Image: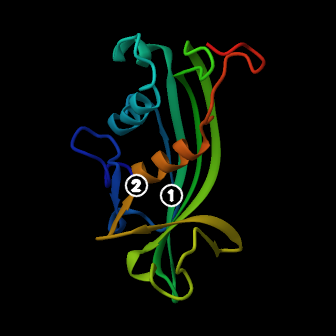
Amino acid sequence: MKNKNDTPNGLLSSKVNLSKIPSGEARFKLNKTHPWVKELLIELNEKVTDLSEEEKLERTELNIDFEIEKKHKTEYGDFVLVMAEINGRFLTECVKTLKTMEDMLHVKFQACFVAETFSESELLLDQTEIYINNDLYELYFYQDNEVDIKEMFHEQIFLNITAYPTLEADGPLN
């Protein structure tokens, strides 16, 4: 899959054209040097206001490892499977003391992208997961033959960060 879905600068685009995903697995390891991964990390760090964006980026990491594979089934047409792991260290604010703190992120998930035309079908109406290839996957839809991988990673990151981070669980309120 090298360079088929890449941007002119050689980096994987945040939206991948379905026709450019090979039938076999393709593996990617991305970090904050990738523009859209950097954007996700900047958003993770946004609660901290006492440091510059550059300082926050120097102190934090976001690594995304994933495999992507295109498949076909009669009832769904072309679909895309993603097996992913996200690891990160980011800055946030303690909800008790309002002090800057570091938090960690570790998420493993599987996702399946099906054509948006199936979003209203009886099989998938109001579903958030799909059982396919003998396994359960988070359900996403692609449109215009583009798989929005950045949006999928964004959703998984923000569903899995600590909602109320604290420096000390038993510490005093500020």
Residue situated in front as seen by the camera: 127 or 24? 127
Q: Nearer the viewer, residue 153 or 44?
A: 44
Q: Residue at x 62, y 65 (%)?
A: 137
Residue identifier under label 2: 1
Please, is residue 28 above or below residue 67 in the view?
Answer: above
Mark 2 is on which residue type?
Answer: Met
Count every numbered label the image shows and give the total: 2
Q: Residue at x 59, y 23 (%)?
A: 95
Indicate the quadrant containing the C terminus: top left, top right, bottom left or bottom right.
top right
* In this picture, residue 48 sits left or right of residue 143: right
Q: Residue at x 48, y 87 (%)?
A: 121
Given residues 94 and 153, the one toward you in this image is 94
Quarter of the picture containing the N terminus is bottom left
State the residue at coordinates (44%, 69%).
141
Secondary element under disc 1, as helix, strand or loop, is: strand
Residue 79 spot, x, y in % from top left:
48, 73
Between disc 1 and disc 2, the foreground one is 1
Q: Decide if residue 167 is on the left or right side of residue 145.
A: right
**137 and 26: which is toward the camera:** 137
Q: CA distance from mark 1 to mark 2?
A: 10 Å
> Label 2 near label 1: C-beta < 8 Å?
yes
Question: Which residue corresponds to mark 1?
Answer: 68
**Residue 23 x/y as whole percent:** 47, 68
Please tell me whether residue 163 is drawn above or below residue 20 in the rendered image: above
